[in-house]
Image (spheres, rainbow, N blue to C red):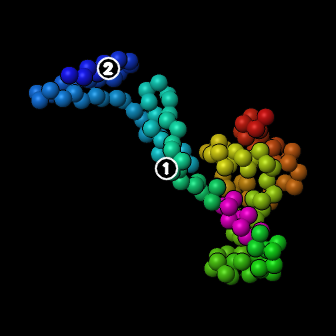
Amino acid sequence: MNEIQIQLTGATDVMATSDGRLTLSIPIQIKRRSGCKKVVLPNGETAKPKAWNIKATPLQLALARGHRWLAMLESGKVKSLKEIAERENIDNSYVSRMVNLTCLAPEIVAAILEDELPDHITLFELAVDPPPLWEEQYAKCAGTCVDLIR
């Protein structure tokens, strides 16, 4: 018969049932991060999600839309942001804000793509009138993604 050893740490609990099976109880927390649920173990560790389990965050989707719409504009497929808005059946100002995301500093874009931007930084803050200079963008995120980036 195979023998399995279980090492208990913390508040983990093992209960034997009458039919010889064991029930392992592990206190976990489920936390939300960027709209996704993550399991947090008692020691604070979280498992890295598998590539196929990762959904794009709203910020990542907005960044992708902005780049797609800018490419449409640059290629000549459309003549204006207003034309994109009409094609997509959405508000013109939304298209403009998403295209603004294409001007973000590379480090901020990387933080968005790696989902490492703090939760309190919103799409609205990044997309509405971003400063043209990257240093000013870092300052706008002062104390948050600047620490992440540098």
Q: Secondary structure at mark 1?
A: helix
- In magenta segment, residue 69: yes
Q: Residue at x 28, y 21 (%)?
A: 4
The residues bearing labels 2 and 1 have C-alpha atoms spaced at a distance of 29 Å
Q: Position of residue 53 (x, y in %)?
A: 49, 49
Q: Residue at x 54, y 47 (%)?
A: 51
Find the residue positioned furthest to the front. Answer: 1
Question: What kind of residue is marked 2?
Answer: Ile
Q: Magenta span covers which residues?
A: 62-70
Horizontally, is 8 left or right of 112 in the view? left
Residue 76 seen in render = yes
Q: Is residue 41 above or below residue 124?
A: above
Q: Secondary structure at mark 2?
A: loop
Q: Is residue 126 above or below residue 30?
A: below
Q: Position of residue 27 (x, y in %)?
A: 36, 29
Find the residue positioned furthest to the right. Answer: 133
Q: Tag 1: Cα neighbours inside 10 Å, few (<14), some, or many (≥20)?
A: few
Q: Position of residue 101 (x, y in %)?
A: 75, 59
Residue 53 is labelled as: 1
Residue 6 is labelled as: 2
SS majority, magenta: helix
